Image (tube, grey):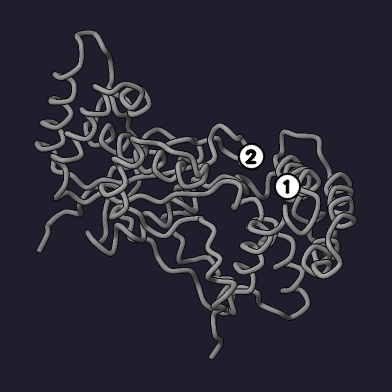
Amino acid sequence: MRSTAPTVYADESNSTGENLLDPAQPVFCVAGVCVDDDLARQVVDAVSAALPSGHGEAKYTTLSKTSKGRSILLSAFGSLAEETIRACVAHKRFMVTAKMVDVLVEEFAHQNGYNMYADGSAVALANMLHAFGRVIGDSASFDRMLQTFVDAARKRTRASADDLFASIAAYQSTTQPEFSELSSVLQLTRAQADETFAAIASGKVQDLLDPALPSLADLCSGMGQIVGDFVLVHDESKIVARNVELLLNMDELPDPARPGQRLERLPLVDIRFSDSTAVAQLQIADWAAGAVRQYATSLVREEPDPFAEDLKDLVKPWLLTGIWPDLSVVENPRRMD
């Protein structure tokens, strides 16, 4: 029996906080690695030795820009083929529609006695809006609606619920008649929007749109299924640091999909912070997060990316469930017992 808990090291790629509609960075990724100290140091030292003297820390962003750097990364990943590496990605634009459904529509339904999580209709609606919103109505109006929601939900901006519902009405006016019910449901949620934005303004709700926490929770759940309970060492992160107690005590929170029950406990013994200049595994986590993010970004953009294609077979086994659109939930809704 293991006398001490294993350690998982995690880092992020393309973290833009609550700015989910930055076209230059459409995907967020967090990756975790469970790698022996000696092997991690050997791999990082080998990468450093292959670089010119004075290159500095070998970050994924820098390495991936040159053919030599890409070759070095592929060699490093080859040395880690047998190691435990997992990652979660978030499609940032999809997260906007998912959050609109989550905090507006689902809350409205819940207050009227209907649990949209239980039968999967919340996820289905988020996917339908993401996939078809720009088709069933004016695309520019739809984009403005999403941006106004993001602006209103970010405490530092001046956009208000009035602005959001003006943009919802403008989009609704362009929606094709046969799809009017799909878009008009948002107009029913003014009370929920007022309540949500008031909670954000007061500081009661923080980080509503940041994908870091839900992605990290999914990563921890997935890693725990492989290594059991573990100590998490995360690269320095303000959002993770201010939510340590939440992550460690997730099982004390109610589960919205199962009334009367609590969320599952995350397999965390402790959460600590360090940086990649001091910990070899955090450098490897940076490479893994960057590689998965690059592959996922190529899927979002649907544009040729030769290096993403080279990475595909390496990174696909690392991927866990993430915040990602999936139209199959619309075609095959969850059945209720």
Residue 80 on image: x %, y %: 16, 43
Residue 230 on image: x %, y %: 26, 54
According to the picture, the residue beneath numbered tag 1 turns out to be 146
Amino acid type, residue under disc 1 in the picture: Leu
Q: Which residue is found at the position 28% from the left and 42% from the top? A: 9
Placement of 180 over or under 158, stated as above or below: below
Can you tell which quarter of the image residue 217 is in?
A: bottom left
Task: Confirm whether residue 307 shows in the render.
Answer: yes
Q: Which residue is found at the position 10% from the left and 31% from the top? A: 42
- Do the residues bearing badges 2 and 1 touch, measured as CB atoms within 8 Å? yes
Q: Which residue is found at the position 74% from the left and 45% from the top? A: 143
Query: Nearest the camera: 26 or 84?
Result: 26
Task: Confirm whether residue 234 shows in the render.
Answer: no
For residue 199, side relative to residue 298 (left or right): right
According to the picture, the residue beneath numbered tag 2 turns out to be 21
Q: Label 2 neighbourhood size at 10 Å, few (<14), some (14-19), many (20+)?
A: some
Q: Earlier in the sequence, mark 2 or mark 1?
A: 2
